[in-house]
Amino acid sequence: MKTEVNDRAPGAGINWRNVAILLSCHVGAVVALFYWSWQAAVVAALLAWLSLSPGIGMGYHRLLTHRGYEVPKALEYLLTVCGTLAVQGGAIDWVVTHRIHHAHADRGGDPHSPREGRWWSHAGWLLTGSAQRHDAATRARYAPDLMRDRGHVWLNRFYYLPLAAVGLLLFAFGGWGVMLWGVFLRVTVGLHVTWLVNSATHLWGRQRFETGDDSRNSMWVALLTFGEGWHNNHHAHPTSARHGLAWYEFDPNWLGIRLLERLGLAKSVKHVSLKATTAEQWLPAREV
């Protein structure tokens, strides 16, 4: 069994697969800038919301990783498909990485701690080792629930198919400009926005709770990630489907989950509020 520490440590062998994917996305994003149109921008914005909010935030993260709520299996698969459009790997590998992060936050074994370097925590960790491509033993250890689900195993293996289909449809009905904006530019921006949760929210911001790690609450990251930037709140209460605990902590992903609950599509929703936790006390921010 591979260890979570050495296989993704700074200095490990280059992951050429990830390098090729990320390089292609960034080159395509630059080319997209020469194909501006309102139609392309609107399509990119809609797909960005679909992939990062219902997909990554509500689906990969709060539903599959932490089981903060339950939905019918068909809807669970649909949210997972939305998450695949973000090109952050299959759901099982994403979940495994994030569960490892919580198990070893800012300690040995954390896949992307800024204590190993700020660039490392943002994107460097994806460029070496087997990041987001875990072996069977690691998947079985950290995501046994998903490994027992044939639907999720299939989606994890062929996670690139939904994006390929979307790309072909965008090209067929909108041409090069819409496809470049809706796929390459949108994916590249979405990746960097998501990576800020790994890097920025472990470097800058405020701590409400003593969690034993460097997690911070960051309003600007929360605004970019549909509520995922309330990271210290999340590390204090990982299974809570609600991350923004105060009235001013805007959390669109939580609002989406609440909407599903009111529509009768979500149940067993776990959440905490400031009234149910310790009294609010801001601790001075510090860099690590």
Image (tube, rainbow, N blue to C red):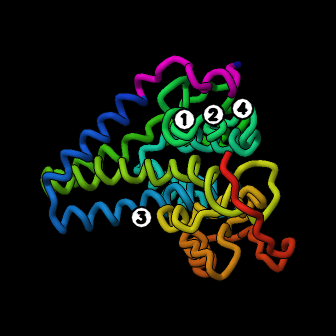
Q: Name the residue under label 2.
A: 116
User: At numbered mark 1, what does the secondary structure look like: helix, strand or loop?
Assistant: helix
User: At numbered mark 4, what does the secondary structure look like: helix, strand or loop?
Assistant: loop
Circle nearer the N terminus (4, 2): 4
Characterize the local packing of mark 4: few (<14), some (14-19) or many (20 or more) Cα atoms within 10 angstroms: many
Q: Is residue 137 left or right of residue 16?
A: right
Say whether marks 1 and 4 touch (CB < 8 Å). Answer: no
Mark 4–mark 3 distance (CA, rounded to whole Å): 31 Å
Q: What stretch is highlighted in magenta?
A: 2-17
Q: Is residue 48 left or right of residue 151?
A: left
In this orientation, which residue lies closer to the viewer: 37 or 284?
284
**Residue 151 locus on image (x, y percent):** 55, 44
The disc placed on residue 226 is none
Characterize the local packing of mark 2: few (<14), some (14-19) or many (20 or more) Cα atoms within 10 angstroms: some
Report the residue at 74% width, 62% height from top. 284
Q: Is residue 87 left or right of residue 100?
A: left
Q: Is residue 82 left or right of residue 102?
A: left
Mark 4–mark 2 distance (CA, rounded to whole Å): 11 Å
Say whether marks 2 and 1 touch (CB < 8 Å). Answer: yes
* Amino acid beneath label 2: Glu
Circle nearer the N terminus (4, 3): 3
Circle nearer the N terminus (1, 4): 4
Q: Does the magenta stretch include residue 126?
A: no
User: At numbered mark 3, what does the secondary structure look like: helix, strand or loop?
Assistant: helix
The disc placed on residue 120 is 1
Q: Mark 4 points at which residue?
A: 109
* Amino acid beneath label 3: Trp
Q: In this view, does 259 lie above or below 103?
A: below
